[in-house]
Amino acid sequence: MHQGKMLAELIASEQPCVALTGAGVSTESGIPDFRSASGIWKRYDPQEYATIEAFRRDPVKVWDFYSKRLDVLGKAKPNAGHRALARLERAGLVEAVVTQNVDRLHQSAGSRDVVEVHGTISSATCVRCGTRLEPDELTALLATSRAPECPACGAVVKPDVVLFGELLPVAAIERATALARGAGLLLVVGSSLEVWPVAGLPQEALAAGGVVAIVNRDPTPYDDAASLVVRGPAGEVLAAAADVLRLPVA
Ligand code: NAD
């Protein structure tokens, strides 16, 4: 694929490369994204299911939504796009993956340095006393309760995803910003670049002298500023780039 070759050349020439991924890297694993025509926010109003106010108002309703997502995400497998990013990292051609996804598919595919700026869905934390529920404990509680309660104090726990209205984990967003500023190439994959502060990372990279490449099905606000825009499926495009670079598959 011609565009895979162009992307491979950019990755090789503009080191270090940092990947910034969004929901679009996981749609080929059967996980719907948020803002596309078939996205989650077309069926669920984020104000009712994904804000911190909604959680305070009606945690059972919010947990019903996240339990369904946890079921879907728990069964999903990494796709060629996740695997290509892990191949690039193993070859020293991707420094780290900054992801907005909470599905852990980058880690399952073998990526080692993954910065989760929107948290993870697989654990939960008590909003009252701070007790953390590990994935196994959370799964066990969800089997018997619609809104799992903290074993220490009895308050309803909150999934460790960043809800709208919450601050991003400070260490993760600081590391993501430093990576973007130090990147020769910020490779954006499957993100509408509409959710802040992550949407500011391409500008951080550009202002520090880096370049931006975008692999996304729909247009983004940064297309005009990007050195390369590929409108293809992320899995196919990234795998083509890794193949051009002759990177081992596993
Ligand atoms: P998005 O849905 O806004 O954008 C996904 C993009 O990926 C779209 O532009 C689409 O064209 C593209 N795409 C879809 N499939 C593709 C494919 N196979 N190949 C290439 N491109 C593809 O998702 P986003 O940018 O990740 O949104 C930002 C974040 O907002 C989400 O990751 C999520 O973490 C988040 N958020 C969610 C919650 C929540 O669920 N509670 C709360 C806060 C923020």
Image: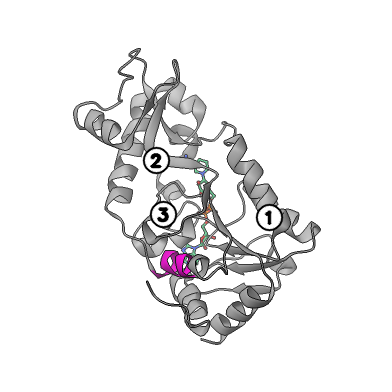
* Category of crowding for the residue at label 2, using alpha-carbon neighbours closer than 10 angstroms: few (below 14), some (14–19), many (at least 20): many
Vertical side of 5 occupied by 221: above or below: above
Hey, what amino acid is under mark 2? Ile
The answer to which of marks 1 and 3 sits earlier in the sequence is: 3
Q: Quadrant of the C terminus?
A: bottom left
Location of residue 148 in the rendering, given as x and y in whole percent from the top left corner: 30, 25
Location of residue 24 in the rendering, given as x and y in whole percent from the top left corner: 48, 60
The CA span between labels 3 and 2 is 14 Å
The CA span between labels 1 and 3 is 20 Å
The answer to which of marks 1 and 2 sits earlier in the sequence is: 2
Residue 107: give its label.
3
Chief secondary structure of the magenta portion: helix
- Residue located 48% across and 83% down the image: 246
Residue 71: give its label.
none
Vertical side of 232 occupied by 136: above or below: above
The CA span between labels 1 and 2 is 25 Å
User: Does the stretch in magenta take in 84?
Assistant: yes
Q: Which residue is at the front of the view, 69 or 201?
A: 201
Q: Can residue 196 be seen?
A: no
Hey, what amino acid is under mark 3? Gln
The answer to which of marks 3 and 2 sits earlier in the sequence is: 3
Residue numbers of the magenta segment: 80-87
Residue 121: give its label.
2
Q: Which residue is at the front of the view, 107 or 24?
A: 107
Outermost residue toward the left?
144
Residue 180: give its label.
1
Residue contact at pointers 3 and 2, CB within 8 angstroms: no
* Category of crowding for the residue at label 1, using alpha-carbon neighbours closer than 10 angstroms: few (below 14), some (14–19), many (at least 20): many
Nearer the camera: disc 3 or disc 2: 3
- Residue located 62% across and 35% down the image: 170
- Residue located 42% across and 59% down the image: 26
